[in-house]
Amino acid sequence: QVQLVESGGGLVQAGGSLNLSCTASARTFSPVIMGWFRQAPGKEREFVGRIMWSSGGTYYADSVKGRFTISSEKAKNTVYLQMNSLKPEDTAVYYCAAVQAGGTLYNSWGQGTQVTVSS
């Protein structure tokens, strides 16, 4: 089972930016999809966006479209979440997840990284 490790979270003022990273530990890593999710206190986990590992195609939730950008660096088994124009409502624990080859569900998850946006 591949291990995913997120980093880059922290405290930022509204309007600021953060760049999260998610790196897979596996020597050979070739997922179908890499996704980003978030969970705010007292709320259910929600989808943020995803990138198709092979083509690089991306898709975003309406709440982050135009502000967040997902990219990947295959040589480093890493996917990024660039977050700009952050809002207090973006405060959450952010998780990356992978849909492995042959699968249809996100079955590998990172431990999460906290993002706090102050007003």
Image (cartoon, helix red, strand yellow):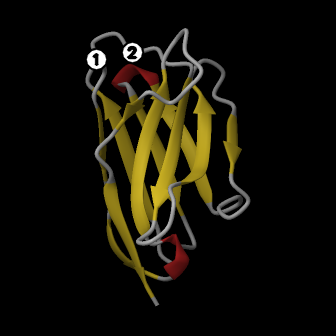
**Would you place residue 24 above or below residue 58 in this image?**
above
Quadrant position of the N terminus in the picture: top left
Q: Secondary structure at mark 1?
A: loop
The correct choice, above or below, for 100 with respect to 105 in the image is above
> For the point 59% across and 50% down, which residue is it?
47
> How far apart, in angstroms, are the residues tagged by discs 2 and 1?
6 Å
Residue depicted at 70% across the width and 42% down the height: 59
> Can residue 87 be seen in the rendering of this structure?
no
Res 115 → quadrant: bottom left
Q: Is residue 40 left or right of residue 35?
A: left
Q: Which residue does the image show at 55% across and 9% down from the upper left?
A: 102
Give the answer, above or below, for where 40 lies relative to 53.
below
In x, y percent, where is residue 107? 44, 27
- Residue labelled with disc 1: 26
Callout 2, which amino acid?
Answer: Phe
Residue 29 has which mark? 2
- Residue 49's tag is none
The image quarter in which residue 57 lies: top right
Dividing the picture into quarters, in which one does residue 40 lie?
A: bottom left
Can you give x and y, in whole percent of width and height, for residue 94 in the image? 41, 55
Residue 90 placement (x, y as % from top left): 51, 71
Outermost residue, bottom side: 119
| Horizontal side, residue 76 vs residue 64: left or right | left
Q: Are marks 2 and 1 in contact (CB under 8 Å)?
A: yes
Residue type indicated by callout 1 = Ala
Describe the element under mark 2 as helix, strand or loop. loop
